[in-house]
Amino acid sequence: MEDSRPRFLDDVTVELVKHSASDSDVLWAARVSTAGEQSIEEINKDPERSKGLINFLMRDRHGTPFEHNSMTFLVKAPIFVFREFQRHRVGWSYNEESGRYRELQPDFYIPGPERKLVQEGRPGKYVFVDGTEKQHKIAVEVMESAYRSSYEAYREMLEAGIAREVARAVLPVGLFSSMYATCNARSLMHFLSLRTKSEQAKVPSFPQREIEMVAERMEAAWAGLMPLTHAAFVANGRVAP
Amino acid sequence: MEDSRPRFLDDVTVELVKHSASDSDVLWAARVSTAGEQSIEEINKDPERSKGLINFLMRDRHGTPFEHNSMTFLVKAPIFVFREFQRHRVGWSYNEESGRYRELQPDFYIPGPERKLVQEGRPGKYVFVDGTEKQHKIAVEVMESAYRSSYEAYREMLEAGIAREVARAVLPVGLFSSMYATCNARSLMHFLSLRTKSEQAKVPSFPQREIEMVAERMEAAWAGLMPLTHAAFVANGRVAP
Amino acid sequence: MEDSRPRFLDDVTVELVKHSASDSDVLWAARVSTAGEQSIEEINKDPERSKGLINFLMRDRHGTPFEHNSMTFLVKAPIFVFREFQRHRVGWSYNEESGRYRELQPDFYIPGPERKLVQEGRPGKYVFVDGTEKQHKIAVEVMESAYRSSYEAYREMLEAGIAREVARAVLPVGLFSSMYATCNARSLMHFLSLRTKSEQAKVPSFPQREIEMVAERMEAAWAGLMPLTHAAFVANGRVAP
Amino acid sequence: MEDSRPRFLDDVTVELVKHSASDSDVLWAARVSTAGEQSIEEINKDPERSKGLINFLMRDRHGTPFEHNSMTFLVKAPIFVFREFQRHRVGWSYNEESGRYRELQPDFYIPGPERKLVQEGRPGKYVFVDGTEKQHKIAVEVMESAYRSSYEAYREMLEAGIAREVARAVLPVGLFSSMYATCNARSLMHFLSLRTKSEQAKVPSFPQREIEMVAERMEAAWAGLMPLTHAAFVANGRVAP
């Protein structure tokens, strides 16, 4: 029997559960075009040339060599994050926990102390600034209270025999969900270019902080698997090829 | 100034806002393969042959001739419907109202009297049956009350100066949203095959009733634009080519 | 009865056969996010603001509002062009003349007098320069002769009762084919960014001249339909959003 | 220095160069929906249930759990095969040898003794039957002769200093090329359903024999990696979920 007391979490989690992804995957894919097939042994002989080739592909936006690899992440984050995440259609596969098949557990998102709560400026030019301590207190208290009431309403309907898929209508988008997300380096770079904010970025982006928290963890895991590709992405202004 | 008293709605709306889609679009696309280009005048000369060709393409799953057309719908439905809808990635384009840029209005979904509320059976074999009057009453009352509280919490945070994108975390997935969705006949058929339930379907599907309500309205609009294609879809077991 | 004497052509053709595409399609799609639905009448009231919004979307790479429109082109070009063209997977639909169903007609590509024939430099940095008159003469004579022989071989096999799909193996990639290609403004911009060469381009590209000839004609047709979107594409360095 | 004497080959080759694909990948992806995350150890405890779940997913066309895996193949086949292959857009990544960057080598396809050369019936109902010995002899002789002439024309232009991308126009679609193709089980099943012919297939298909030869080898490699998934695909009429 699962515990149904609400939990309030101020962080997301990202786990790299599976991967087949390395810089050499980019290299052999690129070299079939220009030099016939090469073995990984041949490719590994000349690391400087490898670095140069990856950089050239990134700069001139030869995108397909970055697609012959695969990474699967298990992501736990609030529904409002998944709503944005799943708008990424190309080169992404998703399987998410179902509110039709399962009774959903009461894990809810609240902003942590670092989360800037106040938005200034106009659409397209928003800036977030720290709220006061009082604002943070209000946010947490109002959210926790609203989450509790929503979850009680959900449970009340379930106990009255109403179907999960109907009862869930009252659950908030701050509820945590879980999904497996599979991508390749190219689709991941596209995601990162839109869902992180960076001074190195040629094109500005304004991601919501919570999806950026997911993106940052994915980027760290990916950088470990494909360091040359990651470095070239950063060096070329974080624009996906 | 917009009214912020909650509204409770038991129906979705679908409006065909724009289209460039007719049966003859399928025909000329198919005939380039086999007979060179044909004018629409030539095609229209022989309606029986047109019907036969569309039926043949559908039956033998020649999918691409069904892609050279376009329909844009404005859909208003609860977030939990859009969560399922936007999982359709191929041949679909979406633009949805943003909870980051706009203050969201308090329109909420409640089940209508026809909505079967009780689920029986096991995963993969669920059947929905009518609930009792009492169950329907509980659902509506609990939902309305939970929705009101959530929206008050949202407003309270906004009034305290907290950003919309943070405050919205308490809003429920039963909140209505709006989106433009553009597709072609092939991507629409794929959607319909999974999101409607029909005795004519070769492959069973178990859509949630609320997305099926959207799908039925889209199907009706499409059937008016491409009657031969729609008839062939139905006659071939509602399997997308 | 079709004439089977070879024809040698130094140009491609592109015809816009169908479209549902205008700048206002971008505007209403974008404004659902920020301002709720707006009628086209409202949108048309303020052309300067429209221009500014389209420019903002392009610059900050908000891509989806550029997808709710559709253009279908009939393209006649050599097979080697279609080989590159059909590598564009996202937001493109194709139907091409079939060498399995039809006897292919002897239209072949030869370089026109403007086509630079000589390549200098190394991979990734090629430059094309004019050949000598003699080189052009060689190219045309060798090609025409090779094309004739290939087509005779094709015909000889057909006359011996060998299936079209087998006999076509000898036909060259310089043979003309026809296809319908349907796209939206976003997928077209991506195509143009890679398949045209321009001093306005932020990212260099090195298209083969023959596919660029197709791309230029498509761009001209599109610019007529969506002038504000086209202008914003050019002003923003010909990078697809 | 590479040998430029033509070689005539009657077979294709397919090598599985890399993979991250097993039946358990389907299982954990599916179970996140219904039962929360499960470890592979838990999943492996109950093989009969695993088989049942995969079969259920296939039958009811739950496609996404079949996407969290990756296979990369190195395929060598004639250009006319790649022309069909690369029409598969969704869930496929390609990198092919470039005729712009490389001098192409003279490997050409000729039909083997098993290849049925004669087509009977009408479009949509073609049947292939054995040709006579004489027909086979004509095909091979005419093809070899045409291929030799084409390749000589190509070489002649190269020697005159004409660019590779121009000279290749005379090369036939029977020329061998090489590509890396990466897919997942779902996109592979879709490919197999259209590019193989089988008595077990619910929906008939009429692939050209040469692409079917590629598809058969891919299917054999995949069946070794994901035996339960492959068995469920066959048992459910070779329809992709």
Image (cartoon, coloured by chain):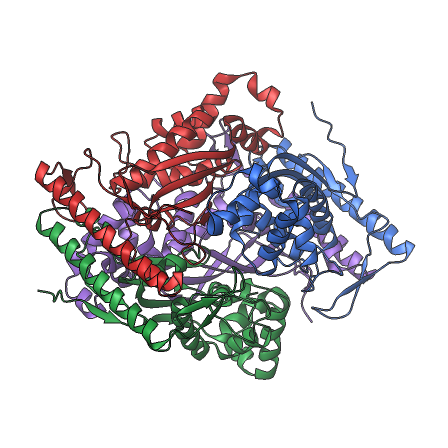
Chain colours: A green, B red, C blue, D purple
Specify the quadrant that holds the N terminus of chain C: top right
User: In the shown orientation, is residue B61 left or right of residue A2?
Assistant: right
Foreground of the two, B73 or B7: B7
Relative to B127, say whether A123 is above or below. Answer: below
Foreground of the two, C5 or A225: A225
Outermost residue toward the right in this view: C133
Residue B187 is drawn in which quadrant? top left
The reply to whether residue D68 is visible in this rendering is no
The total of numbered circles placed on residues is 0
Q: Position of residue C92 (x, y in %)?
A: 55, 46
Q: Position of residue C222 (x, y in %)?
A: 67, 43
Q: Position of residue D233 (x, y in %)?
A: 30, 48
Outermost residue toward the front in this view: B1
Residue C129 is drawn in which quadrant? bottom right
Relative to A154, say whether B139 is above or below. Answer: above
The reply to whether residue B81 is visible in this rendering is yes
Q: Position of residue D217 (x, y in %)?
A: 42, 55
User: In the shown orientation, is residue B187 left or right of residue C120?
Assistant: left
Foreground of the two, A156 or B7: B7
Q: Residue at x 52, y 38 (%)?
A: C39
Specify the quadrant that holds the C terminus of chain C: bottom right
Residue B61 is drawn in which quadrant? top left
